[in-house]
Image: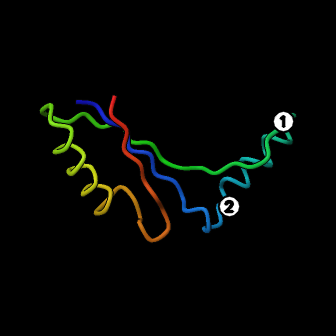
């Protein structure tokens, strides 16, 4: 089973890297960009076919390692 974990900063947390990317896009002439927030993506392959078990394992992985839940949120998508 394949899953994707998307980790982003909470909206209340400042994102200096996103602001730098936003500025760089504008300096490159990319028009219409209002704001940029950066994040992380993890593509994970899991053994088995039970989505509930896989989701529980990924939530545990996020809480323990993949996301800093004080400042980040995460979402899990299954392919």
Q: Is mark 1 on a helix, strand or loop?
A: loop
Q: Which residue is drawn at 84% across and 36% down?
A: 28
Q: In which quarter of the image is residue 66?
A: bottom left
Give the residue pinned by disc 2: 16
Most distant residue in the bottom direction? 70
Q: Which of marks 2 and 1 is nearer the N terminus?
A: 2
Q: In which quarter of the image is residue 77?
A: top left
- On residue 28, which mark appears? 1
Q: Pick the quarter of the image with the C terminus.
A: top left
Q: Residue at x 31, y 36 (%)?
A: 3
Q: Pick the quarter of the image with the N terminus.
A: top left
Q: Position of residue 25 (x, y in %)?
A: 78, 40
Q: Position of residue 42 (x, y in %)?
A: 38, 42
Q: What element carries label 2?
A: helix
Q: In this view, does 36 lie to the left or right of 44?
A: right
Q: How busy is the neighbourhood of tag 2: few (under 14 within 10 Å), some, or many (20 plus)?
A: few
Q: Distance between the residues labelled 2 and 1?
A: 18 Å
């Amino acid at each position: 089973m394949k899953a994707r974990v998307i980790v982003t900063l909470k909206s209340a947390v400042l994102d200096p890297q996103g602001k730098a990317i936003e500025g760089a896009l504008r300096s490159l002439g990319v028009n219409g960009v209002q704001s940029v927030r950066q994040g992380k993506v993890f593509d994970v392959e899991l053994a088995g076919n039970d989505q509930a078990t896989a989701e529980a394992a990924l939530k545990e992985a996020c809480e323990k390692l993949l996301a800093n839940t004080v400042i980040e949120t995460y979402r899990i998508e299954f392919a």
